[in-house]
Image (spheres, rainbow, N blue to C red):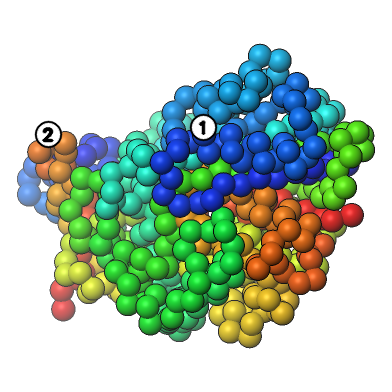
């Protein structure tokens, strides 16, 4: 949606990502407190509503996060689930809330702890009521199918896909919030353990824990709180994935293409104007496909876009400047909010050691969610942020 | 134990098994698996249509880290049938042997072992020999 009145991000927070011994709610509070403090908010009753994204940690997760912060009782807390899109969707809903005038200040959180709850050595699967899951589907494999077809049609090699990991880990080198970071060679990536051919371990996001939080507010509240570097929300879009049981081209991504188109139209900003993007690089192949789906280059030109250095510092658009999911890992309900937090910090020039230079003016985020049979993804959430 | 009777018919007379397509009696749309009601017109009456037993493998992958409870490696892929339907299916055959655009044929086999040890039977596809 295009906000009906100006909506700003006053402050953001994120935890370090990786295996965490803290539960989802404690992680959520760390991110929330950081976001509140950076918004100059010093007491709980200033916040008027909260949206909390989580996918796997149970019921009433939002209240569990917020009770210790004194935020239960005076305001609605809405729990948001849409698999990997939950955190992004929570921010979308907080923006809607403020855009429609229902709240002057709303808090969005995405938080998740997997490692305290998951059997090791297994892969994520959609729900067991899903026909593909019953027949053995795992998310790694569904992306591997896209990679196989992409390689078959374009002649791309596993070494080409590996360059995405190399780039994103390099971006994350000095990012204290990232998990896997620093130099890794193409050989190390392709020779790591095979997960779902052609995707090796180093081409898949890690199963991580973490949280991100975003304080969304009106222009009046920006002034009242004295926020000196507010970031504008030019547009935010949520879509559901079209269902089809017929042959289709999975080297594209219908939901991402439609979502991006809508976002560009509503923001009045085209792909060439975007300075940085955090996208759903859960696997190397996905980032490569999304260059094309987001209109950064033409169909079939993703590999050339990468090889020409367009997706890194000094290129046309720095993609995954925080290191992406390939560096952070992917706590599924958290990532969407954490992407927005990372972009806001870049736009405020608050990323020493991994800062995009000059500080970006326009940032875009993209997070899909949910492996539902017959859809590429069940959900997709995108945001366009602008530094005034 | 057969995973779901709406998906697959294994005729008692020994003739080859087939996947069951569902044609909406109101609008004619053909779906697999069965969708209730018909998403096109909300019709609730369907004619069962045996689907083609051979198709083309759109893409395939070998899984080395699988779902909890499933023993890797195993393979799966998308099979495109002439009826303009795409079937997600496990693939029966050697790991590493499947490629895009291979011609594959319907077979029946174990797709997983239930938590109480019962094999779950459903459709699979295998490469057409020769
Ligand atoms: Zn119908």
Q: Nearer the viewer, residue B38 or A163?
A: A163
In-image side of B54 versus A347 (left or right): left
Q: Nearer the viewer, residue B71 or A350?
A: A350
Instruction: Residue at 49% x, 40% y: name it.
Output: A112
Q: Position of residue A227 (x, y in %)?
A: 86, 43
Query: Relative to A143, does residue A369 appear above or below in the rendering?
Result: above
The crowd level at tag 1 (other Cα within 10 Å; few <14, some 14-19, many 20+) is many
Residue position for label 1 = A25
Q: Position of residue B36 (x, y in %)?
A: 43, 32
Instruction: Residue at 33% x, 51% y: name it.
Output: A123
Q: Chain of mark 2?
A: B
In-image side of B48 versus A304 (left or right): left
For numbered disc 2, what is the local secondary structure? Answer: loop
Calculate the distance from the C-alpha at mark 1 to the C-alpha at mark 2.
35 Å
Q: Is residue A314 visible?
A: yes
Q: Is residue A243 visible?
A: no
Q: Nearer the viewer, residue A185 or A30?
A: A30
Q: Position of residue A366 (x, y in %)?
A: 63, 55
In-image side of B13 versus A66 (left or right): left
Say which quadrant the C terminus of chain A sits in: bottom right
Query: Is the Cβ of the residue at disc 1 closer than 8 Å to that at disc 2?
Result: no
Residue position for label 2 = B116
Query: Relative to B94, does residue A55 appear above or below in the rendering?
Result: above
Instruction: Residue at 10% x, 38% y: name it.
Output: B118
Q: Which mark is residue A149?
A: none
Q: Position of residue A311 (x, y in %)?
A: 64, 75
Q: How many numbered callouts?
A: 2
Say which quadrant the N terminus of chain A sits in: top right
Q: Nearer the viewer, residue A303 or A16?
A: A16
In-image side of A77 versus A218 (left or right): left
Foreground tag (1 vs 2) = 1
**The quadrant where residue B62 appears:** bottom left
């Amino acid at each position: 949606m295009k906000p009906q009145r100006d909506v700003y991000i006053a402050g953001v927070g994120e935890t370090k990502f990786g295996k965490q011994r803290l539960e989802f709610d404690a992680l959520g509070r760390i991110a929330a407190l950081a976001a509140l403090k950076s918004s100059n908010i010093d007491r709980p009753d200033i916040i008027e509503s909260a949206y909390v994204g989580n996918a796997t940690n149970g019921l009433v997760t939002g209240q569990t996060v917020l009770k210790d912060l004194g935020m239960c009782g005076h305001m609605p807390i809405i729990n948001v689930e849409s698999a990997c899109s939950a955190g992004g969707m929570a921010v979308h809903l907080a923006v809607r809330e403020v855009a429609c005038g229902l709240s002057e200040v709303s808090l969005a959180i995405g938080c998740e702890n997997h490692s305290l709850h998951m059997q090791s050595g297994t892969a994520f699967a959609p729900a067991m009521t899903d026909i593909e899951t019953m027949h053995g589907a795992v998310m790694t494999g569904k992306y591997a199918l896209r990679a196989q077809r992409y390689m078959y049609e374009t002649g791309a090699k596993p070494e080409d896909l590996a360059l995405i990991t190399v780039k994103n880990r390099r971006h994350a080198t000095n990012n204290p919030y990232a998990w896997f970071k620093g130099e890794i060679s193409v050989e190390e990536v392709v020779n790591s353990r095979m997960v779902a051919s052609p995707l090796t371990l180093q081409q898949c996001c890690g199963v991580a824990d973490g949280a991100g939080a975003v304080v969304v507010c009106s222009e009046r509240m920006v002034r009242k709180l004295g926020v000196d570097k507010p970031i504008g929300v030019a547009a935010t879009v949520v879509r559901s994935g079209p269902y089809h049981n017929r042959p289709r081209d999975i080297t594209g991504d219908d939901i991402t293409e439609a979502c991006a188109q809508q976002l560009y139209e509503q923001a009045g900003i085209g792909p060439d104007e975007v300075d940085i993007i955090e996208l759903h690089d859960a696997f190397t192949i996905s980032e490569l496909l999304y260059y094309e789906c987001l209109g950064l280059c033409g169909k079939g030109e993703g590999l050339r876009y990468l090889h020409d250095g367009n997706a890194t510092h000094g290129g046309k658009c720095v993609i995954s400047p925080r290191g992406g999911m390939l560096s952070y890992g992917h706590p599924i309900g958290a990532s969407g909010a954490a992407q927005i937090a990372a972009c806001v910090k870049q736009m405020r020039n608050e990323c020493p050691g991994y800062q995009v230079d000059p500080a970006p003016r326009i940032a875009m985020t993209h997070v899909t969610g949910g492996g539902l049979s017959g859809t590429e993804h069940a959900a997709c959430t995108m945001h366009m942020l602008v530094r005034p | 134990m057969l995973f779901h009777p709406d998906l697959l018919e294994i005729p008692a007379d020994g003739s080859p098994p087939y996947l069951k397509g569902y044609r909406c009696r109101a609008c004619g749309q053909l779906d697999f698996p069965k969708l209730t009601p018909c998403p096109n017109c909300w019709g609730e009456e369907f004619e069962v249509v045996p689907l083609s037993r051979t198709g083309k493998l759109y893409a395939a992958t070998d899984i080395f880290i699988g779902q909890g409870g499933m023993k890797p490696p195993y393979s799966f892929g998308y099979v495109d049938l002439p009826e303009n339907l795409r079937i997600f299916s496990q693939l029966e055959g050697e790991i590493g042997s499947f490629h895009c655009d291979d011609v594959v044929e319907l077979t029946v086999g174990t797709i997983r072992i239930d938590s109480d040890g019962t094999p779950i039977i459903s459709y699979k596809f295998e490469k057409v020999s020769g």
